[in-house]
């Protein structure tokens, strides 16, 4: 193994009710992290009720079977917490002194057992989320780019909306019945992963996990049956005219999902093209031809069909046509000739550093272990580096040739000069 | 056995903080190095701090410009060559700007440090500020400014700084597009040469610190003569605005950015450790008065926070929030109502216990692990403080009474004299 010292030692268990428990002992700290991941995200919403998984995340703080105020109890224990929702998952974490770990387990298990919040709590959180929607997606320039882009790229898959939801109205219309149904379908132990990192023995942590979570009834198993996103065969285009100071362009291609073997080479391809100042796009188009003031490439890394994105801000007086031509030249180049050994080494070293940097601290560790377990296996946190390092440049080349074609591309122009 | 969920599990109080767990040495030139060593990972982070923030500028934005452009070429390397080397090893080599200090931060795998540290040294002593890079920087900054100008929070923040410190003050001036036009290559080089010798740095290291690491630090940063205290060039007196209420109209906004605040005591003031607790109670954690009322009860906002910001030559208290235009006036009224309340009714024992326990947990988190702890050490050292200061914070948390907090609220929360900025659309 290359990264012995950066590997995370852990053990995985499954309780009778289906809850997966992952424990990482870290005796270098007085803190511990308790992370609960629910396998539910915006992709599980219906198109008439978008933004619901995220709204629900807010409601999880509104009171549970035996606890009226989650935050107060955790703060009393010297802890802090937060949560986030993505298109694929909803994640909650608590960080507190390990001596008070039971408080976090009590809190997390009680809200997994049964929510108990009022009509008022729902109505307040609907407002809070609407203000969040306004703050991040309406009241700032380019705030709705992802609404437009997702809709353009995805024909069938629920990735066509962002986690905040398609419109304010969907959030405003959420009812208590919606909330209840959602909870008993998705917020069950058999659809969750509990991970713990901190200065506690594995045996003791498992004992406590059993004590607090063991008696929560399992939910019914369900099939997701998400629509499969069809492969794209014709280019798509959308121009959005907005009063913003700078014209931007997005080009997106559908890419393999997070657990597919081609994910690794595709990820590296995006780094070769657009990560860092020495990357191809940044050097050629920002520095040399000066067509863009910012340009880059990245992937969304979602579980189902993801997006491979090239995006940039156009320099003043540069037309979309000129910008597109510049981008196309770089795409042509990476399709024509195999990347150099130095480029390959650069992107692999970057991934190695990213992974090493991510494996630090109880919070990061608890979080990435749970996320990896949701994908397939918590041990991915230790083994994925090998998957990246074994990618040959030929694979990156093949993906560039097969994926980055005009007929599979969705292009968004967004700016004042449309 | 059925688990008892009705009563909360027993709690243990935090009594041990690892703040003293760091070491110190001097390079052969006398430059101080503080470090926190851990064997848990293969990473190393080295931060060199310089007295090169806005406070020291002979002209506006020069500090930020130097930070941005320092990596864009030396007499022997182009920007691309510098990026190629650091990125080849997956290393981070960042220059961070600030109002008083700036930092060069090296963060990489231990095994690659020997390739990165020579580049860091070269940038510090030989940055060349090529004209074409300056031009690109200026273009990009102007573009960024135009985008920022569409945000209500941008206007509110800059008005807030301007009214607190004055338009001529380094903490208070506003950057316009024309500010960038005054930058010249020579002025950048002068500023860089004056402020960025490794001999002027204070160095902070965290991660897997072994002898060979310190040897590299010595070799590359220990040979430049140590520089004495740098004095800022011009008079920098603070001119706070006399008008207290300011409104900036932004017709197309759906939310208003609100900033309320005033200059306040420095972190070395004897009241500060307890004032810090009052601030937490009022608006600096999720269970605070402001969040509980204005977000969790009224649903007016996604977030509302208060904070105390310390610069070397000035400190301020501020309340910040983004609220829907239609509830903006109501939200501001609630802020003042909360201020009156905390000045008239003592915080009860239950709430005080929550705040104390939460804040002790906060100190524990702030000092947990090498990368957090070195940041605390850094802020302490740069403010000329010792770990005794940290002890005083912890002690205040343990001992403060609600009577004392009430007294401080009356002493420092005078909203009649606070600046109030709103940028948005009047409802």
Image: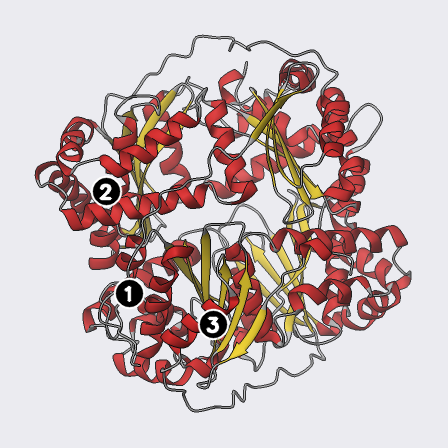
| Residue A300 visible in the picture | yes
**In screen coordinates, is A357 left or right of B6?**
right
Point out residue B13 in the picture as x, y percentages from the top left corner: 31, 49
| Image quarter hosting the C terminus of chain A | bottom right
Residue under disc 3 on the same chain as residue under disc 1 = yes
| Residue B260 visible in the picture | no
Q: Closer to the camera: disc 1 or disc 2? A: 2
For label 3, the crowd category at 10 Å Cα-Cα, with few meaning under 14, some 14 to 19 and many 20 or more, is many
In the picture, residue A93 is in which quadrant?
Answer: bottom left
Residue under disc 3 on the same chain as residue under disc 2 = no
In the rendered image of this protein, does residue A22 appear above or below residue B419? below
Point out which mark residue A10 bears: none
Point out which mark residue A206 bears: 3
Point 59% across, 66% down: residue? A10
Point out which mark residue A125 bears: 1
**In screen coordinates, is B35 left or right of A264?**
left
Cα–Cα span, label 3 and label 1? 34 Å
- For label 2, the SS is helix
């Amino acid at each position: 193994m290359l990264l012995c010292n950066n590997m995370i030692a852990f053990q995985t268990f499954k309780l009778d009710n289906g809850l997966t428990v992952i424990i990482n002992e870290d005796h270098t700290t007085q803190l511990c992290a308790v992370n609960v991941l629910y396998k539910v995200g915006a992709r599980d919403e219906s198109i008439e009720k978008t933004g619901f998984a995220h709204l629900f995340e807010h409601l999880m703080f509104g009171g549970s079977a035996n606890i009226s105020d989650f935050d107060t109890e955790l703060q009393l224990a010297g802890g802090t917490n937060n949560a986030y929702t993505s298109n694929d998952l909803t994640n909650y974490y608590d960080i507190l002194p390990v001596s008070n770990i039971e408080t976090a387990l009590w809190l997390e298990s009680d809200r997994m057992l049964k929510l108990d919040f009022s009509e008022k709590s729902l109505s307040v959180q609907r407002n809070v989320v609407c203000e969040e929607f306004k703050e991040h997606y309406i009241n700032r320039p380019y705030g709705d780019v992802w609404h437009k882009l997702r809709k353009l790229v995805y024909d069938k898959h629920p990735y066509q909306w962002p986690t905040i939801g398609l419109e304010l109205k969907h959030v405003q219309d959420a009812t208590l019945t919606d909330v209840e149904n959602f909870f008993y379908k998705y917020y069950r132990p058999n659809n969750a992963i509990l991970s713990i990192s901190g200065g506690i023995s594995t045996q003791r942590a498992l004992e406590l996990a059993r004590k607090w979570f063991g008696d929560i009834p399992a939910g019914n198993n369900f099939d997701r049956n998400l629509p499969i996103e069809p492969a794209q065969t014709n280019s798509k285009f959308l121009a959005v005219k907005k009063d913003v100071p700078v014209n931007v362009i997005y080009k997106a291609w559908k890419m393999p999902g997070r657990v597919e073997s081609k994910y690794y080479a595709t990820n590296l391809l995006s780094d070769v093209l657009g990560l860092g100042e020495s990357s191809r796009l940044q050097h050629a188009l920002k520095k040399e031809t000066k067509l863009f003031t910012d340009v880059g490439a990245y992937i969304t890394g979602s579980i189902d069909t993801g997006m491979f994105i090239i995006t940039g801000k156009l320099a003043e007086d540069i037309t979309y046509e000129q910008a597109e031509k510049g981008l196309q030249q770089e795409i042509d180049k990476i399709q024509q000739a195999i990347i150099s050994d130095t480029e390959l080494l650069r992107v692999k070293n970057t991934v190695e550093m990213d992974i090493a940097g991510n494996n630090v601290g109880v919070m990061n560790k608890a979080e990435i272990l749970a996320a990896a377990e949701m994908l397939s296996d918590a041990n991915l946190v230790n083994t994925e580096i090998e998957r990246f390092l074994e990618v040959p440049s030929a694979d990156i080349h093949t993906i560039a040739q097969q994926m980055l074609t005009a007929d599979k591309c969705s292009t968004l122009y967004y700016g004042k000069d449309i | 056995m059925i688990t008892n969920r009705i009563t909360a599990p027993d709690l243990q109080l935090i009594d041990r903080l690892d703040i003293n767990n760091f070491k110190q040495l001097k390079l052969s030139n006398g430059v101080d190095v503080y470090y926190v060593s851990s064997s848990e990972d293969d990473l190393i982070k080295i931060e060199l701090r310089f007295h090169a923030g806005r406070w020291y500028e002979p002209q506006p934005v020069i500090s930020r410009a130097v930070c941005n452009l320092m990596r864009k070429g030396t007499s022997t390397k182009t920007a691309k060559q510098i990026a190629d080397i650091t990125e080849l090893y997956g290393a981070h080599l960042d220059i961070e700007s600030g109002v008083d200090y700036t930092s060069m931060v090296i963060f990489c795998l231990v095994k690659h440090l020997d390739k990165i540290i020579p580049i860091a040294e070269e940038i510090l002593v030989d940055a060349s500020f090529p004209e074409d890079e300056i031009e690109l920087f200026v273009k990009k900054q102007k573009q960024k400014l135009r985008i920022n100008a569409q945000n209500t929070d941008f206007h509110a923040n800059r008005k807030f700084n301007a009214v607190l410190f004055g338009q001529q003050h380094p903490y208070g001036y506003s950057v316009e597009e024309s500010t960038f036009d005054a930058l010249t290559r020579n002025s950048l080089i002068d500023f860089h040469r004056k402020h960025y010798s490794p001999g002027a740095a204070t160095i902070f290291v965290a991660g897997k610190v072994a002898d060979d690491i310190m040897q590299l630090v010595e070799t590359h940063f220990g040979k430049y003569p140590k520089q004495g205290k740098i004095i800022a060039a011009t008079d920098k007196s603070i001119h706070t605005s006399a008008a207290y209420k300011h409104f900036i109209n932004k017709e197309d906004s759906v939310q208003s950015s609100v900033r309320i605040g005033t200059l306040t005591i420095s972190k070395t003031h004897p009241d500060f450790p307890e004032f810090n607790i009052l601030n937490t109670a009022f608006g600096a954690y999720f269970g605070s008065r402001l969040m509980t009322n204005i977000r969790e009860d009224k649903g007016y906002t996604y977030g509302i926070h208060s904070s105390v910001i310390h610069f070397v030559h000035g400190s301020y208290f501020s309340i910040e929030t983004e609220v829907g235009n239609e509830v903006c006036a109501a939200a501001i009224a609630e802020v003042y109502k909360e201020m009156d309340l905390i000045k008239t009714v003592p915080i009860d024992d239950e709430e005080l216990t929550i705040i104390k326990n939460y804040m002790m947990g906060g100190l524990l988190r702030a000092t947990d692990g090498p990368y957090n702890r070195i940041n605390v050490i850094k802020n302490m050292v740069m403010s000329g403080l010792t770990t005794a200061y940290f002890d005083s914070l912890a002690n205040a948390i343990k001992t403060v009474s609600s009577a004392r907090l009430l007294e401080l609220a009356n002493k420092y929360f005078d909203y009649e004299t606070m600046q109030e900025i709103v940028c948005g659309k009047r409802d």
